[in-house]
Image (cartoon, helix red, strand yellow):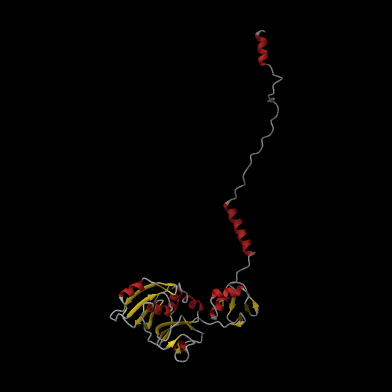
Amino acid sequence: MNNKEGNNRRGGSRPNSSRPNSSKPKPPMAKRAQGPKKVKPEVKAAQEAAAEKFRKQNTPAKRQKASDEIRLNKYISNSGVCSRRDADIYIQSGNVKVNGVPVTEMGYLVKINDVVNFDGVVLTPEKKEYILLNKPKNFTTALDEGQEYRNVLELVRGSTNSKIAPVGRMDKNTTGLLLFTNDTDMIRKFSLPNQKSSKIYQVSLDKNLKFEDLEKISKGLVLEGHRVFVEEISYIEKEAKSEVGLKLRTSNVKVVRSIFESFDYNVLRIDRVSFAGLTKKNLPRGNWRFLTDQEIINLKNS
């Protein structure tokens, strides 16, 4: 085969080739997927403002409490029948009516002149009163001790028209600070065994308190299956060893008496000289006074 023929073969076309002819038109390329268009900040802000306006227009306005309105549970608590917490339970159970209509809504607002029927009884709300008495001897908080000893309510008679009650109990031989109130929440608070506020008592015994007994009491003790924590105990300065100062959290005077009786001492007198930060300063025996606003706040936070 001569060179010319070979050259023609190398330069000629290849009819049997599977390679596409470059002269044919190529199919169009698929468009690349594009993400969502970015919204300009000022447009986004306008959209959010419009959405918020729409929400407010379609949300019922919350009724503002008027100056002569209070919550229903507070109204019930002010009447002295129970605490706010217990009032909520009665409301939810459908046992409270306002102007003849049952109310089960929490936070319901009532006016002072509304007729509130609580479990079949029409209530009369009262202003909260707080009175501090320096109780003398021969008066008791009990109502069933006969006519021999007079009730402590006689000592605060005329102080208020509200139905007040003493906080805690005191027998005839116990003297000192006694709080009266119609605030059922506060009465309940100081009746709890785990209350945080301290009380100080001066205790007169029938004989000198032994130092080893004083140390044992200071470490706490168990009375009737309950642990009693004593914050502080000491002899009264410049007094006989039978005069003892005791600081603990309970407002139950019976516990104070039981502490010393468990060590075979007879308690002659108990005088409560401090109650949750309140003292007998400028309050002679047998006299009473109203608490100041700051003292009330301190009591509620104690």
Residue depicted at 60% across the width and 57% down the height: 48
Q: Is 33 situated above or below 176?
A: above
| Horizontal side of residue 286 vs 187, given as left or right | left
Residue at the outermost bottom position: 147
Q: Report which quarter residue 133 is drawn in.
A: bottom left
Q: Which of 168 and 20 is in front in this view?
A: 168
Percent x, y for residue 245? 34, 78
Percent x, y for residue 46? 60, 56
Q: Is residue 40 visible?
A: yes
Q: Which of 81 and 170 is in front in this view?
A: 170
| Horizontal side of residue 184 vs 63, given as left or right | left
Q: Can residue 65 be seen in this view?
A: no
Percent x, y for residue 173? 40, 86
Q: Nearer the viewer, residue 56 or 182?
A: 182
Residue depicted at 66% across the width and 11% down the height: 6
Q: Report which quarter residue 56 is drawn in.
A: bottom right
Percent x, y for residue 11? 66, 16
Q: Report which quarter residue 235 is drawn in.
A: bottom left
| Horizontal side of residue 22 vs 223, given as left or right | right
Say how many tags the image has: 0
